[in-house]
Amino acid sequence: MTDPTPLHSRHRTVLPDWLALYYKHPIELTHGEGRHVWDADGNRYLDFFGGILTTMTAHALPEVTKAVSEQAGRIIHSSTLYLNRPMIELAERIAALSGIPDARVFFTTSGTEANDTALLLATTYRRSNQILAMRNSYHGRSFSTVSITGNRGWSPTSLSPLQTYYVHGAVRGRGPLAHLDDTAFTAAAVADLEDVLGQARGGVAALIAEPVQGVGGFTSPPDGLYGAFREVLDRHGILWISDEVQTGWGRTGEHFWGWQAHAQNGPPDILTFAKGIGNGMSIGGVVARAEVMNCLDSNSISTFGGSPVTMAAGVANLAYLLEHDLQGNARRVGGLLLERLRGIAATVPAVREVRGRGLMAGLELTKPGTDQADPDAAAAVLEAARAGGLLIGKGGGHNTSVLRIAPPLSLTVAEAEEGAEILEQALHGIE
């Protein structure tokens, strides 16, 4: 028999209070196809958030579902204690695409675990527990990644196994450097980095940075900033970790990886990824040059990282992405969508800024005529967009006043226009 108790009540009875749900009346998604999903009441939505930037290619992509089904029919699980053909094949492709020389790949089950592993590698390699992180950042929900997250809304404790120093530069449009032009902004951020290093005791292990901050509201620095940081880091022997959990796989359109907008001094030492590569399957991972990846002097395995089923999904999903040039589609359709959103914003006083690149757009809402964040307005637009048939996300600093838009990379021009129209109506509804 089906339990007649409303699903939301059952959720609240058995799951943590801090497990966030969207909407005053949360919805249950039951199935999806392409860029659309349906809820338990039969309502159809255009999905502009993709399970938090995870449904990268499309819902129910036949190539991925076929690969998962066929692999599940052979063997579902083996662990990393045995040779695993799909894991090796995916690792070979990612290593070649990473831009990191002599790359090694380690698979995890999430972005949090990937960043946790990157921190383990960096602190072991450098024999230091000191980490540089960016203000307004988010890197996961484990004890170590929470402790380096520069966003109080997602950092429930100040206890930490690491000593973290926070650096300016990741937020272009706010803060003490916002009034500067890009060149002066970068120079000031580099000077701040130098100043912070002057306060650290001994050798810092690594800088971890998102090329475009995800939870922070799709903020990013001027192109080249992390490359400029790299000159300072190299002088001190400090590793650069690029957190590509949300920016990887061509989502920004202009580049396959977010770090490539800062590539004037070479690739990062460590790159982390997750979300989109699995198209909904639980895949995360770390890429590092062999010297760094192999620095651990104890045994390690992953029980579920590199699962044959998830790896088969990743191989099929990546092949589809490359064969259909979804990076190019993100650049073309994303560019059109961003221009459309900027046009809408010009008519809505509550929109302070439209920012982003490719299919990764953020609309920051403030109380009109001020720089004061307006999380209530963001929540209202989220609700109105859902009522109109559009699912979006939100985030941004500690005030959650940025609307986050990140559809599957196969989004069509017609769907981009449809979503923009719904969002326009939702934004005008808060005036």
Image (cartoon, grey):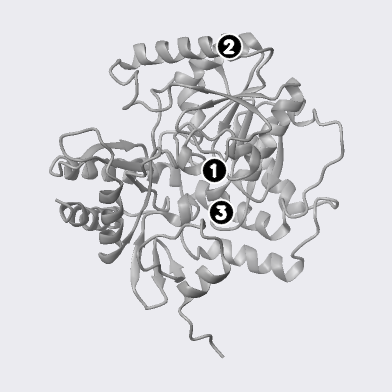
What secondary structure is marked by label 1?
loop
Residue at the image point whose x is 51% and y is 58% from the top: 19
- Residue 218: image quadrant is top left
Establish if 344 lies above or below 177: below
Which mark is drawn over residue 156?
Answer: 1
What secondary structure is marked by label 3?
helix
- Observer-side mark, 2 or 3, equals 2
Position of 298 with respect to 407 (left or right) is: right
Q: Earlier in the sequence, mark 2 or mark 1?
A: 1
Tell me if mark 2 has few (under 14), some (14-19) or many (20+) residues whose alpha carbon lies within 10 angstroms of its own.
few
> At which x and y percent is residue 108?
68, 47
Which mark is drawn over residue 199?
Answer: 2
Q: Earlier in the sequence, mark 3 or mark 1?
A: 1
* Residue carrying label 3: 317
Tell me if mark 1 has few (under 14), some (14-19) or many (20+) residues whose alpha carbon lies within 10 angstroms of its own.
few
What secondary structure is marked by label 2?
helix
Residue at the image point whose x is 67% and y is 47% from the top: 90
Res. 331 visible in picture: yes
* Spatial separation of the CA atoms under disc 3 and disc 1: 35 Å
